[in-house]
Image (tube, rainbow, N blue to C red):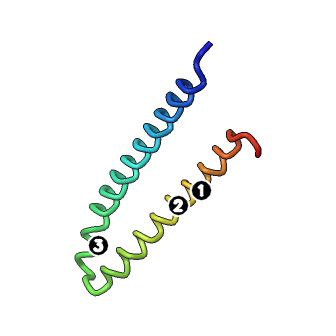
Amino acid sequence: MADTLTVGQDLEGRILDAVHKNNTVAIETMKVMTDAIKPVISVIPSVTPPLVYDFGEQFLVSQRKFAEDMLHLTAKLTPAK
């Protein structure tokens, strides 16, 4: 039978790998999206900072919701106190 500590460490490693992959995908998505909107933004320079900030804010909100959803889901794995 597997040692509880070993199983826990394996699970922790898998979760951290998944988080790292998700972060990598998020960063790559931001790069693609910013490259896609760069030509449009260069045409309207006076609007650039608000657009970039709004976009960044929306992106961070979505990442925060994702993190909260993950915490909520994984909380079900924790024994009740």
Query: Camera-side residue: 43 or 32?
Result: 32
**Between marks 3 and 1 in the image, the one whose residue lies nearer the viewer:** 1
User: In terms of secondary structure, where does tag 3 sit?
Assistant: helix
The span from disc 2 to disc 3 (Cα, nearest Å) is: 27 Å
Q: Amino acid at mark 1?
A: Glu
- Considering every residue shown, the one lying at the far bottom of the view is 46
In the figure, is residue 31 to the left or right of 20?
left
Q: CA distance from mark 3 to mark 1?
A: 33 Å
Question: Could you tell me which secondary element the residue under label 2 belongs to?
Answer: helix
**Depth order, front residue of 8/57:** 8
| Above or below, comparing residue 64 to residue 51 in the picture | above
State yes or no: discs 2 and 3 in contact (Cβ < 8 Å). Answer: no
Q: Is residue 13 left or right of residue 81?
A: left
Q: Which residue, given by chain and number where applicable, does mark 3 sit on?
A: 40
Q: Which residue is mark 2?
A: 64
Q: Quadrant of the N terminus?
A: top right
Q: Residues within 10 Å of mark 2 (few under 14, many from 20)?
A: few
Residue at the spot 63% in from the left edge and 44% down from the top edge? 74
